[in-house]
Image (cartoon, rainbow, N blue to C red):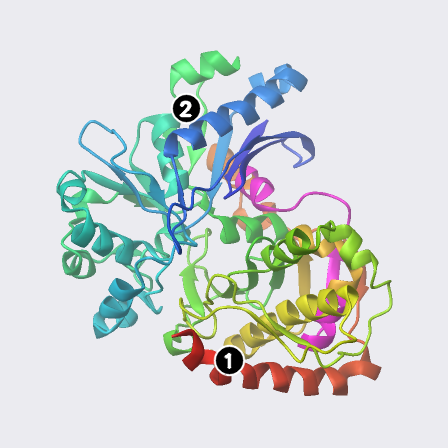
Amino acid sequence: MYLGLDLGTSGVKAMLIDGDQTIVGSANGSLDVSRPHSGWSEQEPSHWVRATEEAVAGLKAKHPKELAAVRGIGLSGQMHGATLIDASDKVLRPCILWNDTRSHVEAAALDADPRFRALTGNIVFPGFTAPKLAWVAKHEPDVFAKIAKVLLPKDYLRLWLTGEYISEMSDSAGTSWLDTGKRAWSSELLAATNLSEEQMPALVEGTEQAGKLRSELAAQWGISGDVVVAGGAGDNAASACGMGTVSDGAAFVSLGTSGVLFAANGSYLPKPESAVHAFCHALPNTWHQMGVILSATDALNWHSGVTGKSAADLTGELGEALKAPTGVTFLPYLSGERTPHNDAAIRGAFIGLEHESSRAVLTQAVLEGVAFAIRDNLEALRSAGTGISRVTAIGGGSRSHYWLASIATALGVPVDLPADGDFGAAFGAARLGLIAATGADPIAVCTPPVTSGTIEPVSALSGTYEDAYKRYRALYPAIKSLAH
C-alpha cells in the first residue's frame, strides 16, 4: 500500500492506493485560514500536523490492515508558504501562505534585480517565498535573526514525519531562490535576501526517497517495517502526476480555490514577462508552465456568500445549455491577480449592471469572468511557446457542466472529463510514494485517466464569447488606476 498526503489550504487529504494504483480509501482533516490584516493569510504549522493526524486516523478507523501495509508515502502541498523554524525546530511565527500579498513592495524590489528573473525564469510574485522573508527581515527582525531553516508547508510535514530537512524541485521552484534550469539552490539569490544555503532544506527529485517514517509514528499508525517518504511535489505538479500530465504538451485546467492552466514541458521554457510560471516538474528532467488566477471557485463561493445561495443552487439556476454573454462582466480579482497582470492591488468588479441584472445574470458573469481569466492564461502560455490543443478538467468547479462549457468556448479547445475517480494531488502524491518505494518507471506509473466525456466549444457562441472576452480584456487597464 502507498499513502498520499496532500496539505491544502482548507484541509489535509490522506489517500491509500494499492500496488495496482486502485484507490482503497481516503480521509480528511480540516484547516482554517487566519486573516489578521487586509492582504494577510496565515496558518499555524501545528494545525497541519493535527489535520494530518485526523486524516490518517480516519483511514486507520476504516482500513487498519491496509494502512499497516504502507511501504511508501508521498507528499503534496500548497506552495510558496514561508514556514520559519529555529535551531531547535520551534516554529517562529505563523506560516505566511501562498495567497498572502503583504510583501508586494519587497517582491517588486527583488523583481527589479535582473538576476531573479534570469535564474528562476519567473517574476518575483508577492505570493512567493523570498519576498516574504524580505518582509520578515524588515518588519520582524527578531524573528528573522533566529531562522535556522525555511521550509515549505509540505516539507514541514516531512520534518514531523521523518526528522529530515528535505524539499524537492517542483515546490522549491516557487520560492524565487531556485536556479530552475539547473535544479539547484542559487546562493546568489539567497544572499540577496540575506539567507544562505545552510538555511535551506536539501533537494531531491519528487520521485526520489526523502527520508523514512519515524518509528514512533509508524507504531502509532500500526505500521511495521521501513516506510519510504518520497520527495513529493507542490500541489499543482502533484495533481499533474495524478492526471498523467507529465509528457510534453499534455495540459489540464484546475478549478479549485485558485485556477490553474498547467502544461507539461520536456524542456525549460521561461518567459517571465508573461507572468507564466515556469517550474520544475516532480519528475526528473521535466519542467512545466502554468498560468495561475487567484480566485476560481473562490469567486463563486464569494458570490454564494453574498447571495445566501449555495454554489450548486446558483449554477443550477443557469440550466445545462450555455447562454450568450449578457453584457455584464465580472473581474475575478478578489485578492489581486497573478497571470497575466502580477498585480496584488487590483480588485474585482461587476461592470455593465442594469435594472434587469438578476442573480442568475450575475452568476453567469462570475463563471464567465473566471473562464476569461483562464483564457488570459492560455494567451500567456501561447506567448511563452506552449500550444494547447485540449485540456482535462479537475477540481471542485469541474462538477459544473455549464462552467466547463463556458471554459471550452472561451478557450476554443475541447475540455475532457476524467472517468469517475479522484486524480488530484493526493493521488499524485501516492503515485510518487509508490515510485520512491519501488523504483518503478515514473512515466509508466503516471498514466492519464480514462476520459468519460468531452465538452466541445459551443461554436454558435464563439463570436459572442470572443466579443465578451475583448470587453473583459479592456477592463483591467481601465480600472487599474482606480485600484492603485
Q: In this view, does 94 lie to the left or right of 243?
A: left
Task: Return the x and y of residue 465 as percentages of the image width and height.
Answer: 72, 82
Choose between 343 and 83: the one closer to the eye.
Answer: 343
258 is higher (above) or lower (below) than 231: below
Mark 1 vs mark 2: which is more N-terminal? Answer: 2
Magenta span? 404-430
Q: Mark 2 points at which residue?
A: 213
Residue at 68% from the left image edge and 61% from the top image edge:
392
Task: Return the x and y of residue 403 as percentages of the image width and height.
Answer: 74, 64
Q: In this view, does 112 lie to the left or right of 242?
A: left
Q: What is the quadrant of residue 208 in the picture?
A: top left
Give the amino acid at mark 2. Leu
The local secondary structure at tag 1 comes to helix
Q: In 3D space, how far apart are the residues under numbered discs 1 and 2 (Cα atoms)?
A: 49 Å
367 is higher (above) or lower (below) than 311: below
> Can you say which quadrant of the picture contains the C terminus?
bottom left
Is residue 417 part of the magenta span, yes or no?
yes
Task: Return the x and y of residue 454 as percentages of the image width and height.
Answer: 79, 64
Residue at 43% from the left image edge and 74% from the top image edge:
483
Residue at 29% from the left image edge and 36% from the top image edge:
165
> Can you say which quadrant of the picture contains the N terminus?
top right
Q: Dot 1: within a 10 Å radius of its alpha carbon, few (fewer than 14), some, or many (20 or more) residues? A: some
Residue at 30% from the left image edge and 59% from the top image edge:
103
Q: Mark 1 points at which residue?
A: 476
Choose between 124 and 222: the one closer to the eye.
Answer: 124
Choose between 371 and 191: the one closer to the eye.
Answer: 371
Give the amino acid at mark 1. Tyr
